[in-house]
Image (cartoon, grey):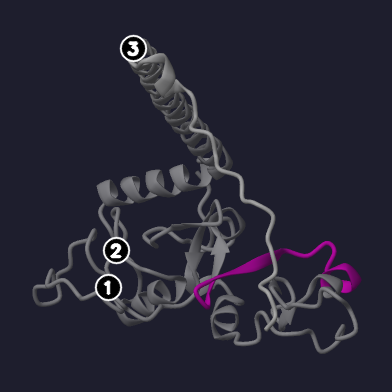
Amino acid sequence: MAIGMDMMSVPWLEKLLAMTTFFTACEVHFNKTKNECNKFCLDCNDRALCGSCIKSGHKDHRVIQIRRSSYNEAVKTTDIYKHVDILGIQTYVINSSTVVFLNKRARTQPKRNNRVGKCYSSDSLCRICERNLVDTSFFCSLACKLAWIKENDGFFVSAKEREELEKLLEESIKVSPAKEKAKLVEQNRKRKLEGDEEDQERENEEVSEENEEDEEKDEEESVLSSIRPPGSLRKPNSRRKGIPHRAPFF
């Protein structure tokens, strides 16, 4: 599997991580309908770009699209892994796409005490911001991995750990979220069908119970009608009121 360049050798990475103008209106194409700046040109390494900017001057350049989740910028693993080494960075699934976050996020969950001195468990906390992680990851974002490399002159893991990280990354790239989504939809459809069948059975049971009750009522009425005397079945004659008369005047 081809791995991207080492982070220290990538000229555009720090500019990308420091960018704060993503998802703002483009100053150049402010009169366009879709002018949100959610793209970055790796070749120009200049500023956040909108779709019109890409069409006008970056057609043949390496361009990545920035995505957002809970006000945090991220990029798809399929877009970034060929350009920079993202081994050891936690991947997340957002809108059916596997992504990595650009910068560290605010840690909302309580920190686990899995740190002993300077030793970390690779499947517990981010080595920089100590954010809780899953899988066999070491960092929560591109920025945290870059900070670790600067502090420690590189990111070193054993051959076995590297093999596991490469396998994890390969799986996250090859796995088609669309297929997973289709599978989930199919499972939900089957559950719904099963639920509909159960509802239909319950309705049939209720209808049969109502029919039984109606039959019982009909039997009771027929029995009562046979017991009652003939006169009791007729309605009593209603007394009609006479013609009203005005009271005499005195």
Residue 70 lies in magenta, yes or no? yes
| 53 is higher (above) or lower (below) than 163 | below
| 173 is higher (above) or lower (below) than 8 | above
Q: Which residues are magenta?
A: 54-73
Instruction: Name the residue at 53% across, 37% down.
Output: 185
Tell me the quadrant of the picture where the C terminus can be found: bottom right
| Horizontal relation, residue 151 to residue 81: left or right | left
Instruction: Name the residue at 35% across, 71% down.
Output: 154
Instruction: Name the residue at 44% across, 77% down.
Output: 143
Residue at numbered disc 1? 127
Residue contact between numbered discs 2 and 3, judged by CB atoms under 8 Å:
no
| Horizontal relation, residue 173 to residue 107: left or right | right
The numbered dot on residue 49 is none
Q: Amino acid at mark 2?
A: Leu
The percent coordinates of residue 62 (x first, y second) are 72, 63
Q: Which SS class for mark 1?
A: loop
Front residue (pair 39, 61)? 39
Residue at numbered disc 2? 133
Residue at numbered disc 3? 223
The percent coordinates of residue 53 (x first, y second) are 84, 75
Between circles 1 and 3, the one closer to the viewer is: 3
The percent coordinates of residue 242 (x first, y second) are 64, 51
| Dot 3 alpha-carbon crowd within 10 angstroms: few under 14, some 14 to 19, many 20 or more | few
